[in-house]
Image (spheres, helix red, strand yellow):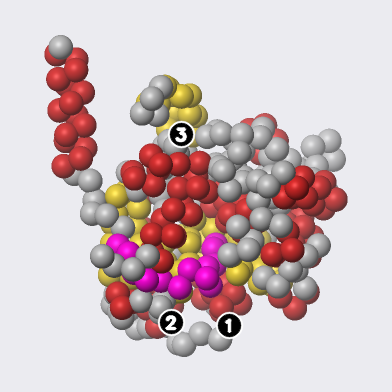
Amino acid sequence: MRRHLALLLSLSSIAAHAAPPLPALSADAAQLTVSGISSGGYMAVQFHVAHSARVAGAGILAAGPYECAEGSAVRALVNCMDPDANDPVPSTAASVALVEADATAGRIDAPAGLVHDRVWLLSGGADHTVARPVVDALAAFYRHWVAATDLAYVKVPGAGHAMLSPDAPDANACDTSEPPFINHCAGVDAPGQLLAHLLGPLAPKAVSAGGELLAFDQTPYADAAGALGLGQTGYVYVPSGCRTGGCRVHVAFHGCRQSADQIGTVFVREAGYNRWAESNRLIVLYPQTTPRYGWTWSGWWFRWVFNPKACWDWWGYEDTDYATRDGAQIDAVTRMVDHLAEAPR
């Protein structure tokens, strides 16, 4: 009885401290774009490929091709981060075959949806976490469908493994690969560059992010999708004027060790998206993972989840469908986007 009472009190405490609900904003989700760094980059690729009929473009920093890991943590760490002659990054033909198989099975949208999309990639010359050949393979993967004029591949010689943002007052030096994995590289504004490529010419960056940076409760979306790797709280930047509807949506996926449970709101405030979003009527959704390592209660049973660095699932720690529309995390984020597109009640 005491154990049941303690559990009820714990659940009541969690509910009492939950963030407010995600607002419905009548957003224009038909022009959806995504981006991400590292594990968030892999998730952005997966989300783009899985939902190519609705995603218009993707910006990827330091990540590789679709289903690179093929459900293996070992492949993720070797072939998809630091490949060599014995453990190479997958060939374009192999990656394309996985896409076609998933599409034929109805697990993802038909890859024809990628043909007219825009893609922006970045690789740092001092990135020793995700090696250049991995991003080269991603570029080759996208070139199978995307026209050369629609794909931009930026190589920054001195950049480490990080988001490259001029908006972070305490950003790391350009060549570092350390938390919070936000670096300052002279003349490089990765969010501005990728948004301009994906969306077309932008209005100048706002002097300040004068809209609303809102925390919201992710648990309804995580529970509905069965996603155990998501944190309790997510974030969304709502520019001034976007409460009245019609604003486009961009989903920004953080990398490993960049979740709010690890670095607070540093990524959602300083990654560099919000000032561009403010002047261009762009809602930025910042979904959040959380560190998990061990048996985790799913609401019905315990499941083993090992993700101590709060990476997005790009090797199957949540489920075998992780890269498809049925993947728990992709499903949860899709539900968030759909809610933003709903009319306020």
Residue 335, x across and y down, in percent: 44, 53
Please report whichever mark, 2 or 3, sits nearer to the chain's N-terminal start.
Answer: 2
Labelled pair 1, 3 in contact (Cβ < 8 Å): no
Marks 1/3: CA–CA distance? 38 Å
Quadrant housing residue 327: top right
Circle 2 residue: 280
Locate residue 188: give its quadrant: bottom right
Which residue lies at the image location 34% right of the left edge and 58% below the top edge? 235
Question: Toward the viewer: 246 or 160?
Answer: 246
Left or right: 68 as drawn, with respect to 43: right
Quarter of the image with the C terminus is bottom left
Three-letter code, disc 2? Asn
Give the image location of residue 122, x and y in percent.
64, 64
Residue at the image point whose x is 37% and y is 65% from the top: 342
Can residue 206 be seen here? The reply is yes
Type of the residue with mark 1: Gly
Sequence order check, earlier mark of 2 and 1: 1
Q: Is residue 154 above or below residue 229?
A: below
* Crowd class of label 3 (few under 14; some 14 to 19; many from 20; radius 10 Å): some
Classify residue 271 by image quadrant. Answer: bottom left
Residue depicted at x 48% and y 54% = 334
Q: Which residue is mark 1?
A: 200
- Disc with the residue nearer the chain's start (1 vs 3): 1
Whether 118 is drawn above or below 69: the answer is below
Query: How many residues crowd mark 1 within 10 Å: few (<14), some (14–19), many (20+)?
Result: few
Residue at numbered disc 3:
308
Magenta segment boundaries in residue numbering: 23-35
The verdict on residue 60 being magenta is no
Lateral position of residue 328 relative to residue 128, left or right: left
Q: Are marks 2 and 1 in contact (CB under 8 Å)?
A: no
Residue 262 shows in this picture: no
